[in-house]
Amino acid sequence: MHFLFVAGERSGGAPEIRAAIRSEVTHFTHEMAADLRAINLFPALSTESLQMICGLVVNTMLNAATDILDLPADADSPQAREQEARFVKQLRLIFLGAMAWKEK
């Protein structure tokens, strides 16, 4: 239910709510970047680049949340498997791009 609220209010809610959601997205992004830095996943990347990559992941999954919530209750349905495969491919693409990213 919270994800639906965030997804809906993220682009159409009151300015104060949109700002609060952006703040939380930034918080999630920074936490993820700190976790990836702690496990030394992308040691050559700057903090700025790492946060950009994590922002892509967080935003991709926020966009996916409404699709996931609209799936039938049967988690093993063909539709659910197809969507899961698409989300995994999207995240894989982000991380493959991150591995090839060159700092300027």
Image: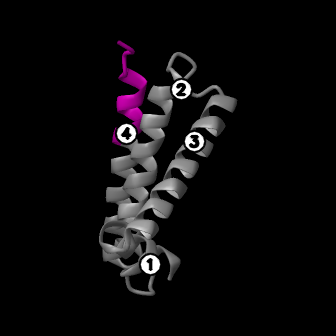
Residue found farthest to the top: 104
Identify the residue position indicated by label 3 in the image.
30
Q: Residue at x 46, y 52 (%)?
A: 58
Which mark sits nearer the N-terminus, 4 or 1? 1
Instruction: Give the residue number, with chain letter if any, for mark 2.
Output: 47
Position in image of residue 87 (x %, y %): 37, 57
Res 85 label? none
Is residue 52 found left or right of 44 in the rendered image?
left
Residue type marked 1: Phe
Magenta stretch bounds: 93-104
Dot 1: within a 10 Å radius of its alpha carbon, few (fewer than 14), some, or many (20 or more) residues?
few
Residue extending farthest to the right is 38
Q: Nearer the viewer, residue 99 or 65?
A: 65
**52 lies above or below 20:** above
Q: Residues within 10 Å of mark 3 (few under 14, many from 20)?
A: some
- The label shown at residue 5 is 1
Nearer the N terminus, badge 1 or badge 2?
1
Identity of the residue drawn at 39% across and 45% down: 56
Identify the disc placed on residue 94: 4
